[in-house]
Image: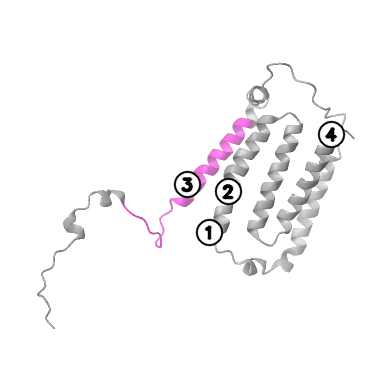
């Protein structure tokens, strides 16, 4: 076993264990931290495949932005774990059936010839001046331009839906009018009162 294979098995083992801890951890903060660990190990696997851009993007986007935001939200919200666990056993058969279905689908996909070692040979040595980012951009905008555009349209629809859900007028919503705050005068906030002096 060479050094590269040993590193692969080491990162894969930590990735699988961290993924299991994401779904088995009782504390949401601990689950998010295990997910960060899983992302770091996945980026290491990307580096072994000579996909430096994807590895850096995984660390910067997911670990640096998404997971930090998720941790802030989890720590700021007062999550009642006991209330979330209510009804767990009643929904267990449906959840187990969906989990077995997903595991079967993954076994069918990963057991096919698409993921055999012969179908995915090890990447060879790169030529001088080879740019992984440039090659990825060329594939995205030539061979996969239609799926790329479709994904962008779906994300645009999701952004518009999130904005529309946020801008709903509710009776219990509290907001400030910046125009009224800027146009305020001193007499609107301060009232001069003349009072006689008090004597003991």
Q: Mark 2 points at which residue?
A: 68
Callout 1 secondary element? helix
**What's the CA distance linking mark 1 and mark 2?**
12 Å
Q: Is mark 2 on a helix, strand or loop?
A: helix
User: For residue 154: magenta?
Assistant: yes
Extreme residue in the bottom direction: 200
Tags 4 and 2 touching, CB below 8 Å: no
Q: Residue at x 21, y 59 (%)?
A: 189
**In the rendered structure, which disc, 1 or 4, sits on the residue that comes first in sequence?**
4
- Where does the C terminus fall, quadrant-wise? bottom left
Mark 3 — residue? 163
Q: Could you say which disc has been placed on residue 76 in the image? A: 1
- Give the mark nearer the N terminus: 3 vs 4: 4
**Depth check: 152 or 127 in front?**
127
Find numbered disc 3 in the image and state the secondary structure of the residue it sits on: helix
Q: Where is residue 148 in the image (x, y as percent from the top left)?
A: 62, 31
């Amino acid at each position: 076993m060479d050094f590269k294979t040993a590193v692969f098995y080491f990162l894969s083992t930590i990735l699988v264990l961290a993924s299991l801890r994401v779904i088995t951890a009782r504390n949401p903060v601990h689950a998010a931290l295990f997910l960060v660990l899983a992302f770091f190990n996945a980026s290491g696997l990307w580096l072994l495949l000579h996909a430096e851009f994807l590895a850096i993007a995984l660390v910067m986007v997911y670990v640096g932005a998404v997971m930090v935001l998720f941790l802030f939200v989890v720590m700021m919200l007062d999550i009642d774990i006991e209330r979330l666990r209510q009804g767990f056993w009643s929904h267990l058969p449906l959840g187990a059936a969906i989990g077995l279905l997903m595991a079967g689908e993954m076994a069918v996909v990963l057991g096919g010839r698409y993921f055999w070692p012969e179908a995915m040979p090890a990447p060879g040595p790169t030529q001088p001046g080879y740019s992984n980012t440039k090659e990825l951009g060329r594939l995205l905008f030539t061979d996969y331009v239609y799926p790329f555009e479709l994904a962008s349209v779906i994300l645009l629809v999701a952004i518009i839906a999130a904005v529309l859900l946020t801008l709903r007028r509710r009776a219990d919503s509290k907001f400030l009018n910046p125009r009224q705050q800027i146009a305020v005068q001193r007499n609107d906030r301060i009232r001069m009162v003349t009072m006689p002096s008090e004597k003991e």
